[in-house]
Amino acid sequence: MIGFIKNSICFFLIVSCQMAVSQHILPSQRRAEVQDAILENRLANLLPQLMDQTNIDMWILITREYNEDPVVKTMLPATWLNARRRTILVFYRNKKNNSIEKLAVARYNFGKSILSAWDKDQQPDQWKRLIEIIEERNPTTIGLNFSEDFNIADGLAKTDYELLMKYLPKKHHKKVVSAEKLAVAWIETRTEQEMVIYDQLVIITRNIISEAFSEAVITPGITTTTDVEWWMRDKVIELGLKTWFHPTVDVQRSNESMGNHLYAFSNRPENMVILPGDLLHCDFGITYLNLNTDCQQLAYVLKPEETEPPKYLVDALAKGNQLQDILTNQFKTGATGNEILLNALKEAKAQGLQPSIYTHPMGYYGHSAGPTIGMWDAQGGVPGDGDYPLYPNTVYAIELNTTVNIPQWKRDIRIMLEEAGFYGEDGFRYVNGRQTKLLTIPRIPLHVTD
């Protein structure tokens, strides 16, 4: 098994180097090989560490086809799109022997390293076979995926829980605990190999945004925001990728018909014709190799006489970058999402900004598990998942906005930004930089002479 993992990682690194140079999106077979190699590495090397950290020596995940536990979905072999029948996974960590057993109480092997531990001919009852495995190992704790605060860690169905407790001998009932911390840690922790991939995801995401916010897609006076949104969806499909939410594109402008109203997330105008002088904003993310991006960027539509964005918009963007710095400077191991939020808001206001912060974990899911750092409608903190602490080797969508008054437009605007950021042992860094300059449409102004 160790040899397989080493060979898989070597293959992965070769593929990754090719990707970094060419920005080539892998075909399906190559994606499957990379995904499975990463999964095998995580199961063999990361999972034992996480089980030790969370003091769970047996983790039982029970799921059924088309009703998959969100954690199980991250463990599916690349050629499996769903679980099969009722699948029960058992991970047993023997810390004394420094070993981990990976078993499937199912009719099939669950990928390459989670092997079937149920012979239906010998034991017709799947639940009784599970109890035999538990009795043979006699764990100290039995972790199950139920959680009040984290939906992704709450994947155990009521029916399966009740059946398990019905079969489980009473002497083991007191060992049953929530596996919330373990499930969240599994979901949020990124490996070195995954971070190589994340760099590529961000490049692809930004390239799509850059093309969408260009003269190749937008003809001022004709193209609408809805046109651009659907162009982005079609581009994702054309590249053989997926998006985990429908893109949004919106406009801020000085036109009196817009009034001095700052649109909330739920009532942005749709299908607006894009005009010269508009400040465009998009919210866009992709899914690739099991990971997700979530990115918001800004572009300015040049007027005929302009060759660059107005200084007041350039300065406004700088205030957005200032707020990003204030927020990420608060990232410290052990600080909770709420502590980071409130400290950042306090500092931002002290520096004269009008901030709103709604940063979230990102990885296997776009809105993933880990410390929630504000919500757009909860700037006083988020009970539960906002009280969860920050751990190293985690990725976040640094999502926020600051309100800026533009006297030239006689109104306020929002500088809304979102970039992928990584928090590691050496502190915070952006996965692949951030937007510090406005995109322009057209990208290179044309100079016509007589």
Image (cartoon, grey):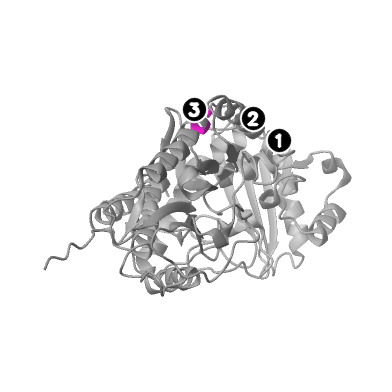
- First to last magenta residue range: 327-331
Read off the residue under disc 3.
329
Q: Position of residue 331 (x, y in %)?
A: 53, 29
Read off the residue under disc 2.
342
Secondary-structure class at tag 2: helix
Residues tagged 2 and 1 counted as in contact (Cβ below 8 A): yes
Residues tagged 2 and 3 counted as in contact (Cβ below 8 A): no
Compute the Cα span from label 2 to label 1.
Answer: 7 Å
Q: Nearer the viewer, residue 442 or 19?
A: 442
Q: Nearer the viewer, residue 314 or 243?
A: 314
- Label 1 vs 3, first from the N-terminus: 3
Residue 329 in magenta stretch? yes
- Label 2 vs 3, first from the N-terminus: 3
Secondary-structure class at tag 3: loop
In the displayed structure, 377 sits above or below 213; it is above
Read off the residue under disc 1.
380
Principal secondary structure, stretch drawn in magenta: loop
Secondary-structure class at tag 1: loop
- Label 2 vs 1, first from the N-terminus: 2
Foreground: disc 1 or disc 3: 1
- Quarter location, residue 205: bottom left
Compute the Cα span from label 2 to label 3.
Answer: 13 Å
Q: Is residue 94 visible?
A: no
Q: Is residue 196 visible?
A: yes
